[in-house]
Image (spheres, rainbow, N blue to C red):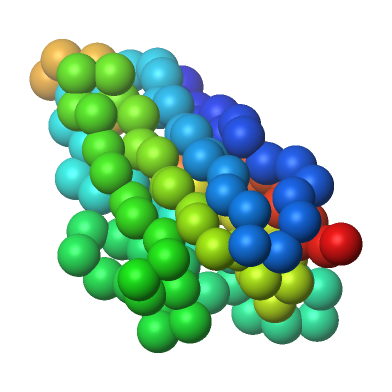
Amino acid sequence: QVQLVESGGGLVRPGGSLRLSCVASGSIFVIYTMDWYRQVPGKERELVAGGTKYADSVKGRFTISRDNAKNTVYLQMNNLKPEDTAVYYCFARTLAGQSGSYRNVDIWGQGTLVTVSS
């Protein structure tokens, strides 16, 4: 079993910062990608940051980084705006399973709520 656990969400004032973390665990052999998405009610889930890609709305304010030794991806969010309010999800594309029976597994975290409000 493979799972992602996010943390770091919360309430922050406009202009503030938050750092989200996402840890992957389980029978993972390789993690190909770890990305961050977000979703607000009534809208589709959108890619926030992944690899070297950033949504236009967060460029210059958000930074994604990864610690491969810890199977962890981070999202540093600075100069937060009310429109950044959303549930943030971690996504990972992995090769997982037991030796001799690996398979591609895409997994989502449970989401962490970020609220930007004064």
Q: Residue 43 is drawn in which quadrant?
A: bottom right
Task: Specify the farthest residue to the right.
Answer: 118
Q: Is residue 94 visible?
A: no
Q: Nearer the viewer, residue 50 or 31?
A: 50
Figure label count: 0
Above or below, comparing residue 62 to residue 41 in the picture: above
**Image quarter of the C terminus:** bottom right
Tell me if 17 is positioned left or right of 9 in this view: left
Can you see residue 51? yes
Location of residue 6 in the rendering, given as x and y in whole percent from the top left corner: 57, 34
Residue 67 position in % (x across, y down): 24, 29
83 w.r.t. 22: above or below: below
Residue 99 x, y percent position in the rendering: 15, 15
Whether residue 35 sits left or right of residue 83 in the image: it is left
Q: Residue at x 63, y 54 (%)?
A: 16
- Residue 11 picture location, percent across and down: 79, 47
**Which one is nearer the viewer's eye here, 55 or 24?**
55
Q: Nearer the viewer, residue 34 or 1?
A: 34
